[in-house]
Amino acid sequence: MNTTIRSCAIAFAVLVIAIVVAADLKIGPPVQAQAGGAQYEADLSWPKPLPNRWALGGLGGVCVDAQDHVLILNRQDVNEGDLNAARLAPPIIEFDSAGNVVNSWGDLKVMDPRLHSCHFDADGNVWIAASPSGMVQKYSHDGSKLLLTIGKKGVFDSSDGTAKGKPLNSSAAAFYMPSSIFVDRQNGDVYVSDGEGTGGNRRVAVMDRTGKFLRQWQPADMEVVHCLTMAKDGQLYVCNRNGSRIQVYDKMGNLKNTIEVPWAPVTPPADGKLTQSGGSVVAIDFSPDPAQRLMFVINQNNSEIEVLDRQTGKKISSFGRPGSFPGQFNQPHGIAVDSTGNVYIAENRGKRIHKFRPVGRT
């Protein structure tokens, strides 16, 4: 009798543990920075395992199309020895909303290898920026056709036409370190942030839909022009990576607002001198509601995603922390938000793509 009771108790305990573990593996823990803020949790069921024993390198960027398919940019910089056990994954990989790989493509003889960002325009075509590079490219959605190249592969906007020359910031459709692209939904104008790293160009360049140069401006006090995106109201948000702020412009380059994104080290440095580890404004995207009330900002210095009120710039919450476990980051670099508010984060050093889903509303 005692043996039977003891066996039943053990079986029940094992069942409870299994349920708890399964639940934890399914959704991961919600993370919230402050009371009343929006909460997000890591979705561990996304993506599904990659096919063909693919191995990823660092991920330069991520973007989402109108069907909530997710595109990642694989830099293919795998670690030495990785390919003894795996095959090199293609440069461009497309997932459906369930996390299945549905397409892959990319020819690095045509593209430049250090892929940095992508963007889907209103027609579903995908734009690709690499850095350093003298060009940006427009492809059909499935990557089968190169539709437009602005600039020229291997020719930089510099004094000697190479990546070693002095940057020129020319009033021309030529580039040095293009970091982000956004195509205006109203007229098809192409906005490019050309200034991914120090020592290169530092400008926003605007071309028409055919690639003809229209205008440019150099954002004030911005050493690195690391990203840009446009809100539905036509305001252009530009990342001042080293300056810890977002500078907001109209389409003609007039400054309309500045949003500070302050940061502080979790462990104060012994010498009292702050040293950035990537910047607090690396990439941004907006919530999918009509007013785009929330703005999501990658803060590499604190290895987290800041959730800001877009109009006021006030911090509402944050999620993430450094590490290799689910919901943790090793150099988050690209961000995209789908039509239901899921947030996708591409890691460079960590070589992973994350999906976070909202579990609380403000």
Image (spheres, rainbow, N blue to C red):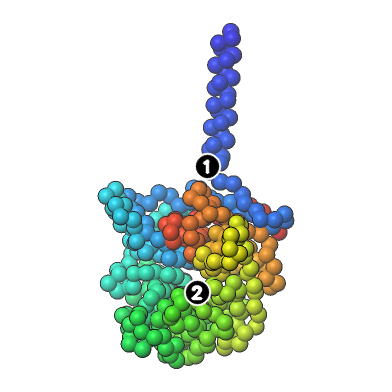
The label shown at residue 25 is: 1
Element carrying mark 2: strand
Quarter of the picture containing the N terminus is: top right
Q: What's the residue type where badge 1 is placed?
A: Leu
Quarter where residue 235 is shown: bottom right
328 and 111: which one is in front? Answer: 328
Residue 73 in view of the camera = yes
Q: Position of residue 300 (x, y in %)?
A: 53, 63
Residue at 60% across / 56% down in the picture? 267
Residue 348, numbered label = none
Q: Nearer the viewer, mark 2 or mark 1?
A: 2
Q: Splitting the image into 4 quarters, where does residue 288 fall? A: bottom right
Dot 1: few (<14), some (14–19), or many (≥20) neighbours within 10 Å? Answer: some
First in sequence: mark 2 or mark 1? 1
Give above or below for 292 relative to 225: above
Quadrant into which the C terminus falls = bottom right
Q: For the residue carrying disc 2, how many other residues have a C-alpha within 10 Å: few (<14), some (14-19), or many (20+)?
A: many
Q: Describe the element under mark 1 as helix, strand or loop.
A: helix
- Distance between mark 2 and mark 1 Cα atoms: 35 Å
Tell me which residue sits at (65%, 80%) in the image.
Answer: 257
- Check contact, mark 2 vs mark 1: CB within 8 A: no
Q: Which residue is mark 2?
A: 226
Residue at x 58%, y 30% (from the top left corner): 16
- Kindly identify the amino acid type of the residue bearing the numbered disc 2: His
Q: Residue at x 61, y 54 (%)?
A: 40
Q: In the rendered view, would you say 123 is above or below 42?
A: below
Relative image position of residue 285 (x, y in whole percent): 56, 68
